Image (cartoon, helix red, strand yellow):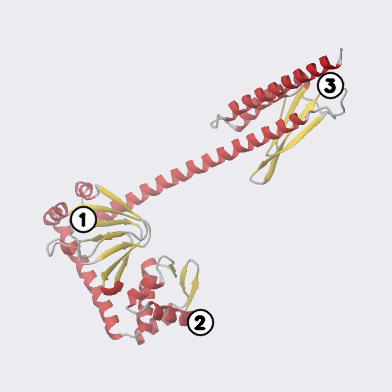
Amino acid sequence: MNLQEKDIKSVLYQLNERTKELNCVYEIDTILRHFDSEVDETINRLIEVIPNGFQFTDICKIKFIYKDKEWESEGFKRTELKITTPIIIDSQILGEIQIFYIKPVKLERKRIFLPEELKLLSTISEKFSDFINYKNLRASLTELKALKQNEDITKEDNLTEWLKSVHLNKSEIAKLCQTRIEFKKGETICKQGTLSSYVVLLIEGTVKSYIEGVQDKNYIFKVDRPFEFYGLSSLFGKDYYHFSVNALTNSSVYLINKEVFIDIFNTNQRFQRTVLSWFCDFHEQIFHRMSSLANKQALGRISDTLLYLHELFNQNEIPSHITRRDLAEMAGVSTENAVRILSELKNENTIEIVKSGVVINNAKRLKTFSIAG
């Protein structure tokens, strides 16, 4: 055989090997597309097709190790003729793929395994890692979706129970809860001075109610969490919103047609008394806030505001979505003044300012400041 014939034979041999490797990769991809398959089943199928990508398929056997469990080809035998590659998932070595030739191989070259075969094995390992990562991601997303659904069901159940507690029946609840709207943080839910075609029911999130002043100076008189109605004051009075409501966090509401609400209000006396009771409580809070503004100095107002939020959130930490400006507008002081007083309270360890908000360390001291005014 002359040199040219040898070169042609070598090229054909190389082409044949590359074809085997490409076919093997295709088979691997086909197997790893079935993300619903169990890992055990997938590995058993991989063990069957991996030898097809190597020169000596008939004597090529596989040992597959993953998470302390081992799989082996039929007729597997450990020899010195092997190559291995780790299985790396999330930067951790969780297993290994081992390739063995179980019989001696006579070759002119020193290396039994071709460089392309080493690359093929590495590619198989990477593809298997991607398969596991995707399965884990799908499982996590499915779990999160289930938790979200359960959370949504719980929230709807809580809403239904609350509406029942204010003496509404199933038919009336269905009439009220028809049009749901989502608001992002910072969006306006109700705008002071605009026509009020709807009563708004807050069912998720945290919002602030405020009177809009001149030169962008507002007065926040209330912060609410579910459940709360807005627009009640326009039912029988002037047909516009008397204050603005803004979402402090992502929030959800139901828009209730005023005529529907008035009809239920007129026909359900127990609900009617509940609404009147809300008005009484609302005015009591407003009178208390007015008294604080009229009679207390800045320290007393800030202390009142912190205690109010402490009670609202039912925890020592006031979350960071209540900004320094919000605190200032609730207390009726400038933002600079509010920041200065908060700094003083921090220095004397009455509060602690952290990334997630303001932590109240000494509520009793705040009450003393509030009483002293």
Q: Nearer the viewer, mark 3 or mark 1?
A: 3
- In which quarter of the view is residue 261 placed? bottom left
Residue 61, by quadrant, is top right
Q: Secondary structure at mark 3?
A: loop
For label 3, the residue is: 103
First along the sequence among labels 3 and 1: 3
In the image, farthest residue toward the bottom: 372
The three-letter code of the residue at mark 3 reads Lys
Give amino acid for label 1: His
Q: Name the foreground residue: 262 vs 180.
A: 180
The alpha-carbon separation of the residues under discs 2 and 1 comes to 49 Å
- Nearest the viewer among 310 and 80 is 80
Look at the picture and state if 94 lies above or below 163: above
- Quarter of the image containing the C terminus? bottom left
Q: Which label's residue is closer to the chain start, 2 or 1?
A: 1
The tag on residue 167 is 1
The circle on residue 343 is none
Q: Secondary structure at mark 1?
A: loop
Contact between marks 3 and 1 (CB within 8 A): the answer is: no
Q: Position of residue 332 (x, y in %)?
A: 32, 78
In the rendered image, the residue lying farthest to the front is: 4
Residue 368, image x, y percentages: 39, 84
Q: Which mark is residue 347?
A: 2
- Horizontal side of residue 242 vs 5, given as left or right: left
